[in-house]
Amino acid sequence: MSDDLEFDTIQPGLHARELAEVRCLLAACQLELDANIDVFVTVRRQGQLIACAGLSGNIIKCVAIDAPWRGAALSLQLVNEIVQLAAERGHFHLFLYTRPENQRFFSSCGFYPLVEVPGHVVLMENTPVGISHYCQRLRMLRQPSNKTGCIVMNANPFTLGHRYLAEQAAAACDWLHVFVVREDVSFFPYADRYVLVAQGLSGIPNLTVHHGSEYMISRATFPSYFLKDKGIVDSCHTAIDLLLFRQYIAPALGISHRFIGTEPFCPVTNKYNEDMKYWLQQAEAKASAIEVVEIARQMRDGLPISASQVRRLLAQQDFSAIRPLVPVSTLQLLLSNYAEPEAERYG
Amino acid sequence: MTLRRSMLFLPGANAAMLSTAFVYKPDSIMFDLEDAVSLREKDAARLLVFHALQNPMYRGIETVVRINPLSTPFGLKDLEAAVRAGVDVVRLPKTDSAADVHQLEAEVERIERAAGREVGSTRLMAAIESASGVINAVSIATSSPRLIGIALAGFDYVMDMQTERGDGTELFYARCAVLHAARAAGIDAFDVVYPDVNDEAGFLKEVELIRRLGFNGKSLINPRQIELLHQAYAPSKEDVDYARRVIAAAEAAERDGLGVIALNGKMIDAPIVNHARRTLQRADATGIRQ
Amino acid sequence: MKIIKQAIAGTLESSDLQVKVSPSPDDTLEIILSSEVIKQFGQQIRRVVDETLSKLQLTAGIIIIEDKGALDCAIRARLQTAVLRGAQCEELNWEQLS
């Protein structure tokens, strides 16, 4: 009967003093306070903070327990509380990053390992059938093929550059699987991006467009992908995302080749591409290597076509400049949903 | 005469506790669906208690369920679960008047009939948690033949009185009122929970006080307190010897067909005989006080 | 009865179990059971689970059970709680729960 432990929740934006205590506890456990935490569960004994666990959407992070209290019922209670809290906030499928030596503890708390970057980090989820059910569904979409390729695109928005990449890849393979990044943090909402991809790729016969998932470039598996503007890169995140692809997704669909466009502008994407060559081809892993094929971007007026360029032109409402860069379907959506009404003229 | 010295509170949402608490041997076990259970776990606790009550491990102990007030969305469902699962006693929180008991009674009877349980088999217990409850203690205590006792609940009562728990002065009147009401109605009286589980001396001091006042028992939140309480309630050797002599005299009088019981030239009437029986009952349960 | 939304009940403390339910994409009933005592008591646990779910007349859902040595009464209770939450069932039918 641990009646002397007090459980509470704090929100980083509201409880500055408590947050400072959490930061100290994390530091004592060699952890940094993650900037994206929505809410913390805290445990106090006689007013003293002895444990905490943070939640960022459906990802559990910043779990710290003061040394004398580890390995006791408290640890289990803490994880239980954060899981309950997540459920109250509508998140039932949870992910967790932790150091490999903590994997066993979280296993006893109902978490199951997905992939490990040896010596660094392991990604876990709170269900024994998350990734396996997902791969089961993918396997049903397998196509008879000797050479199966894959492209993962954010398509923010879909451009002729994307079309070009897909055409080249489809021509080089028996079948091509195209995944659209699911996470809804880009300028264009996922619903629009997916529709534009499907419309933009119509006519290529040996191609399947897939909805993205939490297991592929999501906030859970690759958070820094969405912090490109800040130029933040975390190689552990790219490793996790790429290992998930190599160990689970590619085998389910029989994918042997991954196609990417060369990246002249964005350092994060460029780094991701470099990491891809390492983790998919060279690194030792439980699954066979995937060949990474880089295809030079399609050019227009001396510049490679890119979605970021289209977004810049959209901000300027320069539709005539956008027109040659995108397929008709994309232009139609931009004009109908993203065109600003003409400003009234005065004077 | 059921001994009800110790009533152990168990939080209804805690599966581990419900699965293991039978090893402690309190006189009664109270499964709490009210204050010990958070709002989001009310449904879970109800089902845990529903099933635990039907498990053979609780067959030998008197079971009590503290339901949520009937004015909440939970109370009636709790009552259905408790009665249908065969609980011995339903504890009604925040009993302020006899009407509260009558309302509970009506619902209990309805459920007994619907569930095919012997009408009247579910007993009741009223918990006094407010000034009004204390004032109405007598009418509450005499409101129903199903009542086996009334309890004083310290935490809420003290808040209603706009004070805080201290050395017992704050409970003085309430304790006396509840006790008198119970005695007048011929039912048991139960004292408050002692919240500091680490303060053994303080607990024993309070137990001594309420035992002297005449309380039948006390609500407990920690199994460690059970043995302490039972020991404190154990009669002394002198008490037991005297009790034995009283019973012997009563039995002799009955054998010889005498209308009056005499011991050492003095008349022994019914209250003394009953008291002697209770003493021996406690002695049987715990032995003689060391 | 069908599971129409995700729900969770119970804890992973010793002598308890955690039950997670979610809707089935293909309208089937799938039960995934893991237990610390699967070797000694797996069959018995399975029996209690099947009995409880059939009394509830549950036809579709994904039920993930992680048992930490819970008694039958706890298994019944946690399963029923999770299923009722996941099926958004407010009314309690006591015949189905006994």
Image (spheres, rainbow, N blue to C red):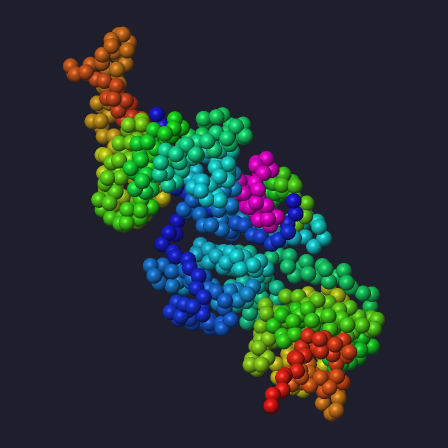
Q: Residue at x 68, y 45 (%)?
A: C59
Locate residue B184 relative to residue A150 in the image: left or right. Answer: left
Q: Is residue A7 above or below residue B152?
A: below
The x and y percentages for residue A58 are 56, 64
The x and y percentages for residue A131 are 65, 61
Outermost residue, top direction?
Answer: B257
Quadrant of residue A252 in the image? bottom right
The x and y percentages for residue B173 are 24, 39
Examine the residues drawn in magenta and state their main secondary structure: helix
Work out whether residue B48 or residue A129 is closer to the camera in this orientation and state it. Answer: B48
Q: Residue at x 74, y 73 (%)?
A: A197
Q: Is residue B272 above or below residue B176?
A: above
Work out whether residue A246 or residue B135 is closer to the camera in this orientation and state it. Answer: B135
Outermost residue, left direction?
Answer: B265
Residue A328 colored in magenta in the image = no
Q: Residue at x 59, y 46 (%)?
A: C89
Q: Does residue A266 appear in this view?
A: no
Q: Which residues are magenta?
A: C69-98
Q: Residue at x 66, y 80 (%)?
A: A341
Locate residue B71 relative to residue B210 in the image: left or right. Answer: right
Locate residue A229 relative to residue B129 in the image: left or right. Answer: right
Work out whether residue A71 or residue A21 is closer to the camera in this orientation and state it. Answer: A21
**Count of marks placed on residues:** 0
